[in-house]
Amino acid sequence: EAQVTQNPRYLITVTGKKLTVTCSQNMNHEYMSWYRQDPGLGLRQIYYSMNVEVTDKGDVPEGYKVSRKEKRNFPLILESPSPNQTSLYFCASSPEAGGPITGELFFGEGSRLTVL
Amino acid sequence: QKEVEQNSGPLSVPEGAIASLNCTYSDRGSQSFFWYRQYSGKSPELIMFIYSNGDKEDGRFTAQLNKASQYVSLLIRDSQPSDSATYLCAVYRGGATNKLIFGTGTLLAVQP
């Protein structure tokens, strides 16, 4: 089954404790992206990647890191989480290498992160 | 001004009625426009896209685009309780960034 898998789905952590949210897709997509979703602010892009070892900042990259060592994986790293990073996070991939020009994004199920 | 603006709602319609969801965008160079549906606690899913001025129909859904007014809308005919969800408008920003810009979404509630 074609899918984007995120882990963990739910996480409560404390300020400053490094964490990683994993994302893996089995569709051989080149384009992958991370979003955060907050009430009243909608979906905002954090980072995206057009291919292995190619990553770039989205609209809200502060406090986050990513890596793309393999095509299927695109982990999101919070080196020192803070309460303002409490949010719902979505990983997504697209079959279009240059970006989702047709709007076709396959989303993971989401990871709800709470930072105390 | 937000790049993509939607009324947050909730928009409440009775079952069987037409639901009309609206979206405006600020970048006049935008070329691709999309509607996603997001059920509570779930991830967004693409339901419609439109590239040209005018209407595009797919089953009970019609997307309308007016580039001169920078306006996109989604009509849902014969609304069903299962259509109750948040509808996200998205615009593709090409060039150097290649990404979708999402609106904040409109919550639709279809009353049985």
Image (tube, coloured by chain):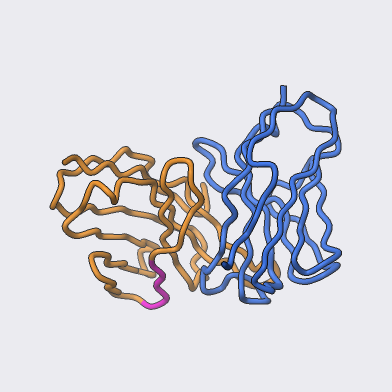
Residue drawn at x 59%, y 62% as measured from the top left: A3
Q: Chain letter for orange?
A: B
Q: Using the image, determine if residue A76 lies above or below residue B45.
A: above
Q: Using the image, determine if residue A116 lies above or below residue A17.
A: above
Percent x, y of residue A114: 67, 29
Decide which of A80, B97 is in the foreground and name it: A80
The answer to if A86 sits in the magenta stretch is no
Percent x, y of residue B70: 40, 63
Q: Is residue B24 left or right of residue B56?
A: right
Residue drawn at x 40%, y 48% as measured from the top left: B6
Q: Using the image, determine if residue B70 lies above or below residue B56.
A: above
Percent x, y of residue B103: 48, 51
Decide which of A53, A28 is in the foreground and name it: A28
Q: Using the image, determine if residue B56 lies above or below residue A72.
A: below
Q: Main secondary structure of the magenta part?
A: strand
Residue drawn at x 69%, y 33% as measured from the top left: A11
Residue found farthest to the top: A116
Quadrant (top left/top right/bottom left/bottom right) for the C terminus of chain A: top right
Quadrant (top left/top right/bottom left/bottom right) for the N terminus of chain A: bottom right
Count of numbered marks: 0
Residue found farthest to the front: A1
Percent x, y of residue B59: 25, 70
Decide which of A73, A90 is in the foreground and name it: A73
What is the magenta range?
Answer: B48-52
Q: Is residue A79 left or right of residue B31?
A: right
Quarter assignment of residue B53: bottom left
Q: Chain letter for blue?
A: A
